[in-house]
Image (spheres, rainbow, N blue to C red):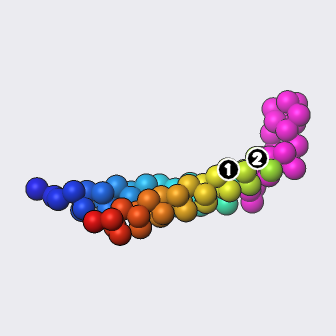
């Protein structure tokens, strides 16, 4: 059976892995504006599209920092 330290560390790394994967997806989305009449019809131009995905990127980077702080804090307290 795995001890608590190992399980917590695995959980943090899993969360970080998911967030890093999301950051890579944001990079793909920012590089490519879909040629979609639907988006333009609903008032989403290229600037709005990029701005939205940049906000998602900032949120993901902030979340990575939060998870890393939690991981370091939990390691120092044990």
What is the span of residues highlighted in magenta in the rendered image?
30-50
Q: Magenta includes 71?
A: no
**Nearest to the observer: residue 38 or residue 51:** 51
- Asked whether residue 7 appears in the rendered view, the answer is yes
What is the C-alpha distance between the residues marked 2 and 1? 6 Å
Confirm or deny contact between disc 2 and disc 1 (CB under 8 A). yes
Q: Which residue is mark 1?
A: 56
Q: Magenta includes 49?
A: yes
- Asked whether residue 21 appears in the rendered view, the answer is no
Which residue corresponds to the image point at 39% horizontal and 58% vertical from the top-left? 12
Q: In the rendering, at what x and y percent does residue 28 appear?
A: 67, 58
Q: Which residue is mark 2?
A: 52
**Nearest to the observer: residue 68 or residue 75:** 75
Q: In the rendering, at what x and y percent does residue 22 appear?
A: 56, 54
Which residue corresponds to the image point at 74% horizontal and 54% vertical from the top-left? 54
- 43 relative to 52 in the view: left or right: right
**Nearest to the observer: residue 76 or residue 65:** 76
- 44 relative to 22 in the view: left or right: right
Which residue corresponds to the image point at 44% horizontal and 59% vertical from the top-left? 70
Which residue corresponds to the image point at 41% horizontal and 64% vertical from the top-left? 73
**Nearest to the observer: residue 17 or residue 42:** 17
Q: In the rendering, at what x and y percent does residue 62 appear?
A: 61, 57
């Amino acid at each position: 059976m795995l001890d608590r330290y190992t399980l917590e560390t695995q959980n943090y790394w899993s969360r970080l892995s998911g967030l890093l994967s999301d950051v890579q997806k944001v990079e793909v989305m920012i590089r490519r504006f879909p040629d979609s009449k639907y988006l333009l019809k609903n008032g989403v131009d290229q600037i709005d599209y990029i701005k939205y995905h940049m906000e998602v990127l900032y949120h993901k980077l902030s979340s990575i920092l939060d998870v890393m702080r939690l991981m370091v804090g939990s390691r120092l307290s044990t």
